[in-house]
Image: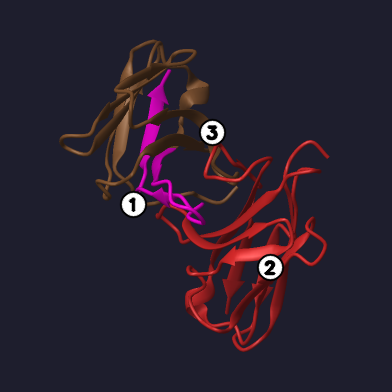
Chain colours: A red, B brown
């Protein structure tokens, strides 16, 4: 497709459940980012991949959060044992080059933990 | 679609008038700045960027001004249209090997009054 695709669009999880969020970046894009956006806030950085290498995971809030991009294309953000404070929109972005230059964001996955 | 932000600073402007959205950034070492537009239910959309060696940059109907002395950015939108209604975020980055992440501000909700 022409843009960054994220699925599912909405996810409701019971507290304690594991979830997996998928990101399909624009084909050929080297860089891939995950951000978390709480209601009423700006996006906050979670992690960054350059091809398949996870170069920065400093924003992951706890060891319950795990991200992978095994073949340098599709990425999955996994949250284990979800908690209510994990409720947010999870945004994926990709870029054709390295560096923080004009990423293209997807529409996000809205996660609600009940 | 879901709201991007319920308690953001707001600005209401009459259609056809000019609008100015302000942002104070946090890191004096930041050398790259971007303005994003976010509509309800969508990811942030790139509008315009500026590097720290410039103090002004113009695009189509938009101008970004950078004042490094007081760590202030502004986005001017000329001849506003109903489609300009959205939440606007500034974001900053400082170039350092491996530092690819953007730090976003809290956002401003712009409403265009027909």
Q: Vertical placement of A44 versus B65: above or below?
A: below
B99 drawn magenta: yes
Relative side of B95 to B43, left or right: left
- Nearer to us: label 3 or label 1: 3
Which mark is drawn over residue A84?
A: none
Question: Going by the picture, which residue comes out furthest to the left?
Answer: B70
x 73%, y 44%: residue:
A29
Mark 3 Cα shell of 10 Å, populated few (<14), some (14-19), many (≥20): some
Q: Vertical placement of B88 versus A45: above or below?
A: above
Identify the subunit bearing mark 1.
B
Q: Are marks 2 and 1 on the same chain?
A: no
Identify the subunit bearing mark 3.
B
Percent x, y of residue B51? 39, 31
- The region drawn magenta spans B88-114
**Secondary element at tag 3:** strand
- Residue bearing the label numbered 2: A11
x 55%, y 84%: residue:
A63
Q: Are marks 3 and 2 on the same chain?
A: no
């Amino acid at each position: 497709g022409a843009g960054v695709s994220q699925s599912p669009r909405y996810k409701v999880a019971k507290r304690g459940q594991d979830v997996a969020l998928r990101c399909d970046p624009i084909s050929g894009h080297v860089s891939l980012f995950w951000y978390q956006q709480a209601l009423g806030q700006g996006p906050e950085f979670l992690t960054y991949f350059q091809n398949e290498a996870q170069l920065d995971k400093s924003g992951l809030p706890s060891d319950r959060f795990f991200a992978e991009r095994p073949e340098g294309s599709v990425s999955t953000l996994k949250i284990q044992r979800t908690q209510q404070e994990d409720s947010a929109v999870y945004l994926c972005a990709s870029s054709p080059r390295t560096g923080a230059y004009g990423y293209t964001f997807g529409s996000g996955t809205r996660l609600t933990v009940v | 679609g879901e709201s991007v932000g319920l308690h953001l600073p707001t600005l209401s402007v009459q259609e056809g008038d000019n609008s100015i959205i302000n942002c104070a950034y946090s890191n004096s070492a930041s050398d790259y700045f971007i303005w994003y537009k976010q509509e309800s239910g969508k990811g942030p959309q790139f509008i315009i960027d500026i590097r720290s060696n410039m103090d002004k940059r113009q695009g189509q109907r938009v101008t970004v001004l950078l004042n490094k002395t007081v760590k202030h950015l502004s986005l001017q939108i000329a001849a506003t249209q109903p489609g300009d209604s959205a939440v606007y975020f500034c974001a900053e980055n400082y170039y350092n090997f491996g530092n690819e992440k953007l730090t976003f501000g809290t956002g401003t909700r712009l409403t265009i009054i027909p």
